[in-house]
Amino acid sequence: MSERKVLSKYYPPDFDPSLVGRTRKPKSAANTPKVQVVRLMAPFSMRCTACGEYMYRGRKFNARKETRPDERYLSIQIYRFYIRCTRCSAEIVFKTDPKNQDYLVEQGAKRNTDPWKRGLEDGAGGGEDDETDEQRLDRLEREMAEAAGEEEKNAMAELEQKTEDAKREMAVADALDEIRSRNARLEKAKSEGADLLEGVVSRVTEEERERQRQEEEDAEAARRAFQFARRQEMLEEIVEEDEEVVGETAGAGSMGKPGPSSSSVPTKVTASTAMTTATTDSTDMPPPSFKRVVKRKKDHGALLGIKKKKIA
């Protein structure tokens, strides 16, 4: 394989170097610009005026660099560059600006707005002429007025903020007062509810006591009624026994003729004994019992002659 970079050249056998003469190019004039082809990147974003194509900063171009000896700024050389649009191939020219440490577009494009840059008017030129004293004074006065306006705006904004804070604090205080009043109402309702509950409980206990007292009175009345009925039955039995005794005594007197005093004395004694017994029974008689009495079953097997075996 042949080498990529050829170090030796081929000379034919009939080559005569004396026949090759030296040709001199005419010297350029002193003011003739020097042109070179260089590879560069776009120093700023721009828009082509012919087709409207946008070319952003950092885009690479093959450009012609023109150096003019008569264009200098404080002995700093100014360079001019010629590039072409990537879409329509229109020529775009821009140059260096040592005064503002920037670049200026001369032809074929419009620079995009850079708000952080000063001394540029819509991105094209505007910084070539020096700023006069009057312009500087006007600019300073304008900046001072803007600063004063900003301070006034800040003061108004601060006042409005304070007003809003005061309103917010008042709203918070009202809300807290409402919460406190509601809590107080709830506490009062709870206390009243407890008092009402105590009153209801006391009323229930009083009703229970009244009911118990009524039941006791009813039981006592029933007991007295049963005692009275039993006493009446006993009195009736005593009266019947007395009548029988009196009849028997009268029959005996007619047969043996005893004296009237002997017949009357037992009757009185019997009546007094009956009264004493009735009084004793009325005072010492226990209350009637309503307990169920279980009757014993009769042994019908014994009646039929059936005998049960006894278990030892």
Image: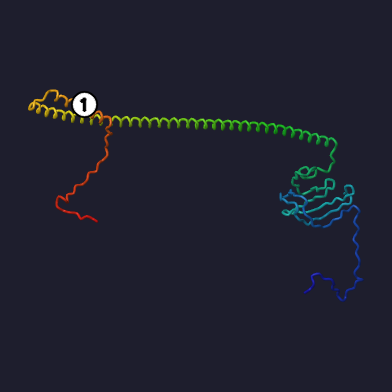
Q: Is residue 311 above or below residue 202?
A: below
CA neighbours of label 1 inside 10 A, class few (<14), some (14 to 19), many (20+): few
Q: Position of residue 108 (x, y in %)?
A: 77, 49
Q: Is residue 303 left or right of residue 73?
A: left
Q: Position of residue 178 (x, y in %)?
A: 56, 31
Amino acid, disc 1: Ser
Q: Position of residue 158 (x, y in %)?
A: 70, 33
Identity of the residue drawn at 86% across and 55% down: 34
Q: Residue furthest bottom?
A: 13
Q: Is residue 32 left or right of residue 197?
A: right
Number of disc labels? 1
Q: Position of residue 123 (x, y in %)?
A: 77, 45
Foreground of the two, 99 or 65: 99
Foreground of the two, 10 or 54: 54
Residue, disc 1:
272
Q: Quadrant of the C terminus?
A: bottom left
Identity of the residue drawn at 84% across and 39% down: 131
Q: Is residue 150 left or right of residue 211?
A: right
Foreground of the two, 206 or 229: 229
Identity of the residue drawn at 84% across and 71% down: 7
Q: What is the basis of the colouring in this image? A: rainbow
Q: Quadrant of the N terminus?
A: bottom right
Q: Residue furthest right?
A: 18
Identity of the residue drawn at 28% across and 30% down: 283
